[in-house]
Structures are given as structure tokens and as C-alpha cells.
Image (spheres, rainbow, N blue to C red):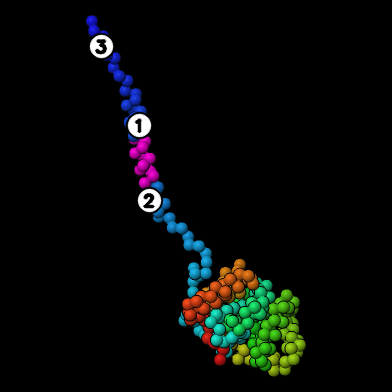
Amino acid sequence: MKNEPKPKSGIPLVIIGLVFVAAIVGVYFLYNSSKETAKVKTPPASNNSNRTATPVNAPPGAQPPNMLGSPTAAVTVEEFADFQCPSCGSTHPAMKEIQQIYGSRIKFIFREFPLTMHDKAYDAATAAEAAGMQGSDKFWAMHNLIYTNQKSWSVDPNYKQVFAGYAQQLGLDVAKFQTDAAGLPAKSRIDADLARGRGLNVSSTPTILVNGLSIPYPEMNVQGMRQFIDAELQRVQSQGAAPANSAPANK
């Protein structure tokens, strides 16, 4: 009798089949995964070019504005601030240093933006504007005194007398100062600045715009603001570009 061949085991074929199926499943999942990954967009890097310009159809604000520097400068730094706002008070020294560093290379404009949450802010703004009615330099001198002494007058129930004392210290006509502080012209200037700020979507203080582009609050220090201003100075110099959304020049 001849020996019959032994049947071959089917196990290797089963293993090969399982490997083949696993390979197909793996390719399918890799394909779907790659499609999902393609849908995810990498966020753009944070830089000056990604800042959003403010609206251009805002009211002009008080005219002439409270301005330092050159009215013809290509770069406008516009600050909306509240005299009773602690953050504005903290930023004040940096703003003074920026003004000293750039001088006539920029046009610096201060806009009154007293917030209703601060009970003395509007009166502080009228004090600054009333001082300005006796000379532009007197506005800036009163502006500095109010910010420098913010912690004291902001808790003093007789704060209006404190402002009158500042006026006397600055050599102003105190009687005229008090009349102007209570008058419509000073309030009209503040209201005009408020209207401009609202038109530019300003909702908090301080808000600082460089040619209409907003500086993030963490960058409102000398080093941070210099980066924004220098970039804009370089842009307008290299491109001959007109200032973006800048405020009207002092007339």
C-alpha cells in the first residue's frame, strides 16, 4: 500500500489572511486620520501684521486735540484714558517716557475717556480741560499732577478743592479755572472724545492706538510700545504709506 500524503495545515494561510486584513484596516485609518489633520488650521503667529485696524468712520473727537509731538508726523499714538483708572495711572510713566523718546517723530494725542464706574473721573477730566483753556502746556501739567497724585485725590471727598489747589500750584487763574471746569466748553470736549472712543469700539482704559491699531494691554510698557511704534515708523518710511486711521492733525 502506498503512503498517502499528509494534509497540509491551514494555519499559515489564516495568519497571512489576518495580516492582510490588518494592513487594509491600518491604511484606512491612516487615510482618515490624514484627512482630519488636514482640516486643522495652524493658528497664525502673533505679530503686528495680524492686528486689526479700528473703524475709520469714528467722530474726530475734541478739536484741537490735546497733542504733543508734531502735527505732521506719519505715526499717531492716540491714548484713550480715565484719570481715576488705576491701570491708566500705572501706564502714565511709560507714556511720558515714550513722548520723550520719540518727540516730533510721532503725534501723541490724549483722549478723555472717563468711565462711569469711576465717580470722580469725569470731574478730573473737566479739571484737565479747564487747565488747558489757559494754555496747552497747562493741560499737560495738570494731566501729570492728576495722574501722579491719583491715589490721594481719588479717595478725598473734597477732590474738587484738591484740583483747585493744583491750579494754584500751576499759576492758573483759579477763579477762571473753576468756572471753566463747570462750563459747557470743557464738557463738550470730553463728550467729543467719548464719542470718538465709542466710534472706535473703545470699551476699556487705557486703550492705545498706533496709527489706529490697538496695542495689547500687556505690551503697554516702554519696551512693548517701542516695538509697535518702531515697526510703524519703519513701515511708513519704507512704503511711503499714509498713516492708518490716524486722528486729525492739531489745527
For label 3, the SS is loop
Bin the neighbour count of mark 2 within 10 Å (Cα to Cα): few under 14, some 14-19, many 20 and up.
Answer: few
**Disc 3 marks which residue?**
4
User: Percent from the top left, x then y, of residue 161?
Assistant: 74, 85
**Disc 1 marks which residue?**
18
User: Percent from the top left, x then y, of residue 109?
Assistant: 59, 82
For label 1, the SS is helix
Bin the neighbour count of mark 3 within 10 Å (Cα to Cα): few under 14, some 14-19, many 20 and up.
Answer: few
Which of discs 2 and 3 lies nearer the camera? The answer is 3
Which of discs 3 and 1 lies nearer the camera? The answer is 3
Q: Residue at x 60, y 91 (%)?
A: 185
Residue 224 vertical placement versus 17 (above, below): below
Q: Amino acid at mark 2?
A: Lys
Range covered by the magenta-colored residues: 21-31
Bin the neighbour count of mark 1 within 10 Å (Cα to Cα): few under 14, some 14-19, many 20 and up.
Answer: few
Q: Amino acid at mark 3?
A: Glu
Question: How much space separates mark 2 and mark 1, taking CA atoms?
Answer: 26 Å
